[in-house]
Image (cartoon, grey):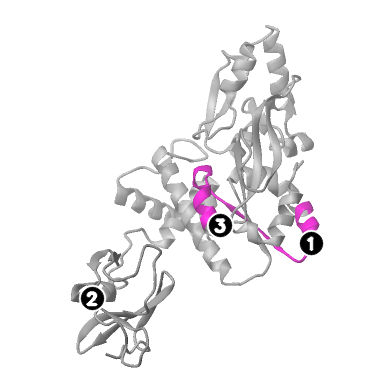
Amino acid sequence: MRAHAARGHAQEIGRGRIKIMRRAGKPYLVGEKFDLGIGPFRGLRIVFHGLPYQLQDSSSAGEDGGEGMLFPLLSRAHSHIKNDMVNRRYSIPSLSSLVAFEAVARLRGFARAAEELNTSQPAISRHIRNLEIRYGVAFFHRDKSPVTLTSKGSQFYAGVVQGFDALQSAVQELKQVDNRVTLVCSHSVSHLLLMPRYGDLRNALGNEAELRVMTAEYNLVQAAIDSGGDIVFGYSETAPDTEHVVVCAEQIKPVGTPEMVQQAVDALSGKCEAPPLLRLQKENYGWMDWMDWWRAHPEYADWPISEEFDSYVYLLEAAASGKGLGLGWRSFVDPYLARGDLVEMPVEWHSTSTKVYARLTHFGQKNLAAKKCLSLLANLQ
């Protein structure tokens, strides 16, 4: 029996190839004899497109002396394969409503989102209202300005941003740029560590490589890595197993405006009430917080928390505007200290064994430009 392998759709399996074809009105799998690593293909029970099959050898050799093998394939499997793409559906909101939601959440205001998207504020409000009606949840706290995300809104925002980042990555991959280096990190690392030093890093890297920064919520960074990141930033008490550098050690102390810091100094000596504290409310994945500072400096333990933030960038902005005393991470807060927007409490930095590492992913290990970039990231001060 001759297997007309030139017809049909080819698909890689193991170390051989198979083809889906139709002969005498019946669907078949046609392919070479090959080994999947656990014995010959003959009689192997497999799952094909989600359906289980017992495949049997129906011819040991083709008429022309080749090694063609013919396997019966159930008709319902053929229909499943044929209709797989046709039946695929995604129950998600419109792209315009997701874009509006992301802009409002990121800019923390309906008017600012409307200005960025070149549309009207009522149009933005309609998109958000329709989303909230559709899912029966409130995404924003509207009783204060700027608007903030609810807990459900924060969860949804993380997914939306991750989806947009993946889409943006796919679009940029179409450009087929050689020697591209993609850094994957949290929004805080991007804004506070990389952005102030981006120009120096770019100049040191040279013109032979394109530098790109992909941001994601810290708990979603792994998914961003899978989309093609070369270097990833993360917190850890132990060094990564793969090639890496230390970007900075974790050190903290309170920071604030000169007036707020002076009030804190006076409060420690009993001259006045303690200033309000600003706290990061997002889930902690290993970095220090006020609890760590209180354990090291119990004299601060009774000071009141006045406001919480789900973004460290927003927390520092609030501290710079005099809203309270924030906890400063060294290297992250350096730009604010250099500009004089914030000043340090006159105490020593508190440190632990936690460090911020930059490490090569499996993509970066094959990218010479990424290896050069990694060496430049060492002790990024």
Give the amino acid at mark 2. Leu
* Percent position of residue 130, x then y: 34, 53
Q: Would you name the residue on which mark 2 appears?
A: 73
Q: Callout 1, which amino acid?
A: Gly
Residue 121 makes an appearance in the image: no
Task: Name the kind of residue labelled 3 in the image.
Answer: Glu
In this rendering, is residue 238 above or below 262? Answer: below
**What kind of element bears circle 3?**
helix
Distance of label 3 from label 2 (alpha carbons): 55 Å
Return the residue nearer the eye: 316 or 146.
316
**Foreground of the two, 368 or 183:** 368
Q: CA distance from mark 1 to mark 3?
A: 33 Å
**Foreground label between 3 and 2:** 2
Give the mark, 1 or 3, whose residue is nearer the N terminus.
Answer: 3
For marks 3 and 2 on the same chain, the one whose residue lies earlier in the sequence: 2
Identify the secondary structure beneath mark 1: loop
Q: Residue 179, percent across and down?
A: 68, 66
Residue at the spot of label 1: 206
Q: Which residues are magenta?
A: 200-226
Q: From the viewer's perspective, is residue 232 above or below residue 349?
A: below
Quadrant including the N terminus:
bottom left
Residue highlighted by disc 3: 116
Query: Callout 2: helix, strand or loop?
Result: loop
Q: Quadrant of the C terminus?
A: top right
